């Protein structure tokens, strides 16, 4: 055989030789942060495809690099797709963090380390003024708002990100490879600020297994529901203990987030387009019956309700029982007599944006079909600011309100 033919034979055989050796996947990826529910802590979560140690090395910004370390654990997640792909989800809790201090960190093991990231520890002072970005329905394909959110997060504009359901479209697809790719996409946001989540309908496949395994929310509920009352009383699900007078005095705002809204004026025949919405009023055709949320939230004085699912932005006047309860004609959000609803599900996904019903009910105050996301700042115990950013209009703020409340709780409605 000539030297040329021999070289060609080896070249063609090379792929077979490579494919015969299992790859070594010990490199951390999909790094993201979340609050652990206890002041002075932060949870770091990441993925590898081989089993390794779970370690975070970190230090105060400006101090000797990586002078502290913490050890956690990894859990095996086997996706339920046809390939039964395996991955290891690592979780490490960092403790004794100084309030509002900046830290640098990386995660992994001696078999591979992540990039170096930074974060600011929770400022748990009652005088803090936390800043949020919040949105739902952000996908792997057509993630319209992602680049702007990446840059703004790294500029330090946000203390927390709230993702109100529907991730990746969908995490389980292609034997969970879409979930991997989406988690890599948001690492440039979620490795720098806590990425707090709640599930949506697109997470339901295989009993929410991709969502339950990939995220690390407070409590022992597999991230399906939890309460967070350090920065403010924030509830994807509800905990009536937050409404005790002594708790409300310290953290007066109660803000809920959940994927499917009680109200909307989209033209798509979803539950929220009907008067007898299941989310609002519950349903009796299940065992046990499913209670509605509107009366519960009203009774415990929820101030603001954040929703997604509809691929639009819609701000409502203060509403209860399908009726408007503005504070006054001139200042509807000053001492409103019912909760304020915001629907923000247009961050960007392959299903595109929705259309609106041309004849909305009187509770619909502002609507937009632009791709975009929302911002919120809890300024103090009486003032809260929210605005909507249009990505279609190069980051223009297209809507904004101040919610002003001199009283919180049920007494605010009367």
Image: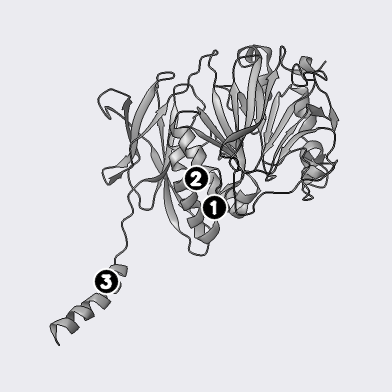
Position of residue 7 in the picture relative to residue 367 (left or right): left
Image spot of residue 386 (x, y percent) = 64, 27
1 and 2 marks in contact (CB < 8 Å): yes
Q: How many marks?
A: 3
Question: Which quadrant of the figure contains the C terminus?
Answer: top right
Earlier along the polypeptide chain: callout 1 or callout 3? 3
Residue 361 drawn at (x, y percent): 85, 37
- Secondary element under disc 1, as helix, strand or loop, is loop
Image coordinates of residue 89 in percent, x first then y, are 43, 45
Q: Secondary structure at mark 3?
A: helix
- Specify few, some or many for label 2: CA neighbours under 10 Å numbering under 14, 14-19, or 20 or more: many
Q: Is residue 33 visible?
A: no
For disc 3, the marked residue is: 17
Distance of mark 2 from mark 3, alpha carbons?
A: 34 Å
Tell which tag, 1 or 2, sits nearer the viewer: 1
Q: Nearer the viewer, residue 54 or 317?
A: 317
In the picture of the structure, the residue carrying the numbered disc 2 is 214
Residue lying at 79% horizontally and 50% vertically, measured from the top left: 269
Look at mark 1 in the image and give the residue it sits on.
171
Secondary element at tag 2: helix
Question: Which of the two discs, 1 and 2, labels the residue nearer the N terminus?
Answer: 1
CA gap, disc 1 to disc 3?
Answer: 32 Å
Left or right relative to 133: residue 296: right
Q: Height in image: 250 above or below 49?
A: above
Q: From the viewer's perspective, is 275 left or right of 231?
A: right
Residue at x 76%, y 28% (from the top left corner): 296
- Name the quadrant of the N terminus: bottom left
Which residue lies at the image location 50% right of the left edge and 55% below the top edge?
178
């Amino acid at each position: 055989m000539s030297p040329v033919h021999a070289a060609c034979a080896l070249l063609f055989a090379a792929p077979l030789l490579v494919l015969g050796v299992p790859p070594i996947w010990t490199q951390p990826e999909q790094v993201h942060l979340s609050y652990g529910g206890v002041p002075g802590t932060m949870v770091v979560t990441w993925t590898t495809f081989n089993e390794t140690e779970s370690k975070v090395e970190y230090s105060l910004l400006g101090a000797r690099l990586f002078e502290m370390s913490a050890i956690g654990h990894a859990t095996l997640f086997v996706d339920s797709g046809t390939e039964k792909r395996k991955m290891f989800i690592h979780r490490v809790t960092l403790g004794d963090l100084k309030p509002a201090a900046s830290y640098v960190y990386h995660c992994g093991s001696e078999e591979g380390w992540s990039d170096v990231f930074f974060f600011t520890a929770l400022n748990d002072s009652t005088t803090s003024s936390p800043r949020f970005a919040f949105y739902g329905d952000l996908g792997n394909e057509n993630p319209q708002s992602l680049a702007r959110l990446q840059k703004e997060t790294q500029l330090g504009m946000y203390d927390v990100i709230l993702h109100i359901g529907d991730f990746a479209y969908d995490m389980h697809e292609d034997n969970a490879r879409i979930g991997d790719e989406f988690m890599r996409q948001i690492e440039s946001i979620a490795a720098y600020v806590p990425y707090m989540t709640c599930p949506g309908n697109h997470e339901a496949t295989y009993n929410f297994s991709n969502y339950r395994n990939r995220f690390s929310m407070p409590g022992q509920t597999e991230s399906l529901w939890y309460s967070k009352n350090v920065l403010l009383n924030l509830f994807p699900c509800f905990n009536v203990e937050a409404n005790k007078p002594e708790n409300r005095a310290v953290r007066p705002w109660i803000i809920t987030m959940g994927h499917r809204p009680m109200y909307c004026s989209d033209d798509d025949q979803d539950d929220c387009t009907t008067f007898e919405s299941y989310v609002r009023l519950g349903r009796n055709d299940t065992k046990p019956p499913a209670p509605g949320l509107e009366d519960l939230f009203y009774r415990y004085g929820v101030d603001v309700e954040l929703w997604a699912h509809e691929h639009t932005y819609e701000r409502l006047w203060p509403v209860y029982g399908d009726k408007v309860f503005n504070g006054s004609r001139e200042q509807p959000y000053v001492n409103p007599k019912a909760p304020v609803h915001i629907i923000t599900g247009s961050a960007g996904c392959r299903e595109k944006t929705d259309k609106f019903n041309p004849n909305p009910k009187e509770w619909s105050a502002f609507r937009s079909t632009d791709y975009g996301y929302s911002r919120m700042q809890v300024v103090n115990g009486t003032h809260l600011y929210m605005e909507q950013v249009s990505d279609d209009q190069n980051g223009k703020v297209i809507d904004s309100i101040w919610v002003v409340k001199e009283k919180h709780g049920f007494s605010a409605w009367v």
